[in-house]
Image: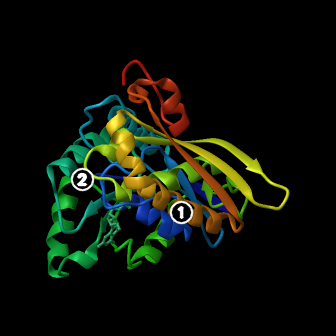
């Protein structure tokens, strides 16, 4: 008898949701940076535990939204939780019960509707073991979690136990994806995310939040390589200059790093072409949101 279902990973920005997703899947399907709000859309990564197919849904962080993009991201995160069989709330061990965590706990009962919520205290490598007991107790006093796990998504501690438990909780039924599929995200989008990760790692302050990357064309060539064209949208001329860098050095480095990663992911040669476009209003354009896999509503 097989089992299958969805597990939503929710938590504050930077809690380690994407790191955990990649660790569970065993491949990098979601981009990870040290900056908050890296993940914008819902990304599904698929893991197999014995007879169970676990579809992990990585979500944007839950935080107090200010802009339209923020609101669309937070809506996608709660939407991911509402659709899942099990919800996993990640809390950072060294930060504990922050105002953000309290806000999430307050909002949780409304979306769970009786479904199991597991508490995952992540980044245990950053604290002394003694600190974990108090935090576990405090959080369990605030919400009735089905189970608590102490893990380090980065180092891999505690992750196998979590996966086994999740597998046992999912409903019986046929698998939802072919057994060799590891992500449910179009390749064009994965490729755009890879470039956005490289940009985010090199750019400072607000700029990463004011840019987006789209794959415009993808051509399979006869020699087995792929020719990929992407556009980086920024809001100001000044940003374009920063993205290009002195004598084009920044964009060259980004392009090289993204091309190498994409090529390794695909297992074949990639020709990547990046173009920067100034689009002062992209944050208000419906098309940009659908490219990111987000809903664009009047409300957000
Ligand atoms: N020390 C430590 N850092 C972690 C761990 N898990 C994730 N991180 C780091 O936390 C940052 C945010 O991770 P990310 O997965 O992007 O968080 P997300 O915003 O919740 O998706 C990155 O710099 C990760 O390398 C962990 O278990 N231990
Ligand atoms: Mg993330």
- State the residue position of label 2: 143
Q: CA distance from mark 2 to mark 1?
A: 46 Å
What secondary structure is found at the residue carrying circle 1?
helix
285 relative position to 242: left or right: right
Relative to 38, say whether 240 is above or below: above
Ligand 1, seen in the image, is in the quarter at bottom left
56 relative position to 280: left or right: right
Residue 192 position within the rendered picture, expressed as x and y whole percent measured from the top left: 54, 49
Q: Residue furthest front?
A: 247
The residue that appears at 51% across and 51% down in the rendered structure is 193
The residue that appears at 52% across and 57% down in the rendered structure is 255
Number of on-image labels: 2
Residue 180 position within the rendered picture, expressed as x and y whole percent measured from the top left: 71, 64
Q: Residue furthest right?
A: 222
- State the residue position of label 1: 256
Q: Are marks 2 and 1 in contact (CB under 8 Å)?
A: no
Classify mark 1: residues with Cα within 10 Å, few (<14), some (14-19) or many (20+). some
Which one is nearer the viewer's eye here, 245 or 69?
Answer: 245
What secondary structure is found at the residue carrying circle 2?
loop
Classify mark 2: residues with Cα within 10 Å, few (<14), some (14-19) or many (20+). some
Which one is nearer the viewer's eye here, 184 or 79?
Answer: 184
Residue 202 position within the rendered picture, expressed as x and y whole percent measured from the top left: 36, 58
């Amino acid at each position: 008898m097989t089992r299958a279902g969805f597990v939503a990973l929710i938590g504050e920005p930077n809690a380690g949701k994407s790191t955990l997703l990649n660790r569970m899947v065993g491949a990098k399907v979601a981009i990870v940076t040290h900056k908050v709000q890296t993940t914008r859309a819902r990304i599904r990564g698929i893991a197999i535990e014995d007879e169970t197919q676990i579809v992990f849904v990585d979500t944007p962080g839950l935080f107090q939204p200010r802009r339209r993009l923020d609101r669309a991201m937070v809506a996608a995160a709660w939407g991911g939780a509402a659709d899942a069989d099990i919800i996993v709330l990640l809390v950072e061990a060294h930060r504990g019960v922050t105002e953000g965590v309290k806000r999430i706990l307050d909002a949780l009962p409304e979306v769970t509707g009786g479904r199991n919520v597991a508490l995952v205290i992540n980044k245990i490598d950053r604290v002394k073991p003694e600190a974990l007991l108090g935090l576990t107790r405090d959080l369990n006093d605030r919400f009735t979690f089905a189970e608590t796990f102490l893990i380090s998504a980065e180092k891999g501690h505690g992750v196998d136990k979590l996966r086994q438990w999740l597998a046992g909780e999912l409903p019986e039924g046929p698998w939802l994806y072919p057994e060799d599929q590891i992500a449910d995200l179009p390749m064009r989008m994965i490729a755009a995310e890879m470039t956005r990760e490289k940009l985010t790692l090199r750019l400072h302050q607000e700029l990463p939040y004011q840019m987006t990357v789209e794959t415009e064309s993808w051509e399979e060539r006869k020699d087995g390589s792929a020719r990929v064209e992407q556009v980086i949208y920024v809001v100001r001329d000044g940003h374009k200059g920063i993205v290009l860098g002195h004598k084009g050095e920044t964009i060259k480095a980004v392009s090289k790093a993204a091309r190498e990663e994409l090529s390794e992911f695909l297992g074949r040669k990639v020709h990547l072409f990046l173009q920067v476009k100034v689009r002062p209003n992209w944050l208000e354009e419906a098309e940009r949101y659908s490219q990111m896999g987000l809903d664009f509503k009047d409300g957000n």
